[in-house]
């Protein structure tokens, strides 16, 4: 990926917002039902709706799957957000290392 293309992929709303919305109090039955619904939506390809449910329920596995999906779509900043919120430190750190390597390579090309 060239520098110009990578810069175009930076989201307009900035890089990383790691704070989630206010926690919604859910009992375990409601949370489980919402997670099932989020999984159904994810499997149907309704990724953004599934993401909202996974964020609301703080469902780490779902957020990690959303992150992997974003990585496959070359939406690395969005993937990083999901890994950060999940939390998935190993996936977050691996993605940060990959992105850092790209920036280091660009800097060497400039110099």
Image (cartoon, rainbow, N blue to C red):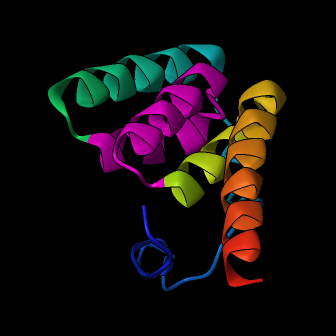
The vertical placement of 51 against 16, above or below, is above
| Left or right: where 109 falls relative to 43 | right
| Picture mark count | 0
Q: Is residue 59 left or right of residue 38?
A: right
Of 3 and 93, which appears nearest the observer? 3
Q: Which residues are magenta?
A: 47-75
Q: Residue at x 24, y 22 (%)?
A: 43
Residue 90 versus residue 56: which sits nearer the camera? 90
Q: Position of residue 31 (x, y in %)?
A: 55, 23
Q: Position of residue 20 (x, y in %)?
A: 71, 56
Q: Is residue 6 visible?
A: yes
Q: Quadrant of residue 59?
A: top right
Quadrant placement of the C terminus: bottom right
Q: Position of residue 17 (x, y in %)?
A: 71, 67
Q: Residue at x 37, y 29 (%)?
A: 38
Q: Is residue 62 magenta?
A: yes
Q: Is residue 85 at all visible to an observer of this figure?
A: no
Quadrant where the image shows the N terminus: bottom left
50 left or right of 103? Answer: left
Location of residue 61 by image quarter: top right
Residue at the location (80% across, 26% down)? 90
Majority SS type along the magenta span:
helix
């Amino acid at each position: 990926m060239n520098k110009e293309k990578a810069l175009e992929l930076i989201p307009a709303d900035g890089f990383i917002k790691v704070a989630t919305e206010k926690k919604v109090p859910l009992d375990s039955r409601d949370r489980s039902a919402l997670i099932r619904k989020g999984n159904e939506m994810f499997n149907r390809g309704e990724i953004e709706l599934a993401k909202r449910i996974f964020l609301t329920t703080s469902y780490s596995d779902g957020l990690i799957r959303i992150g992997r999906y974003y990585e496959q779509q070359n939406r690395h900043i969005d993937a990083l957000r999901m890994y950060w919120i999940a939390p998935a430190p190993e996936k977050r750190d691996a993605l940060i290392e990959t992105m850092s390597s790209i920036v280091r390579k660009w800097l060497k090309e400039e110099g």
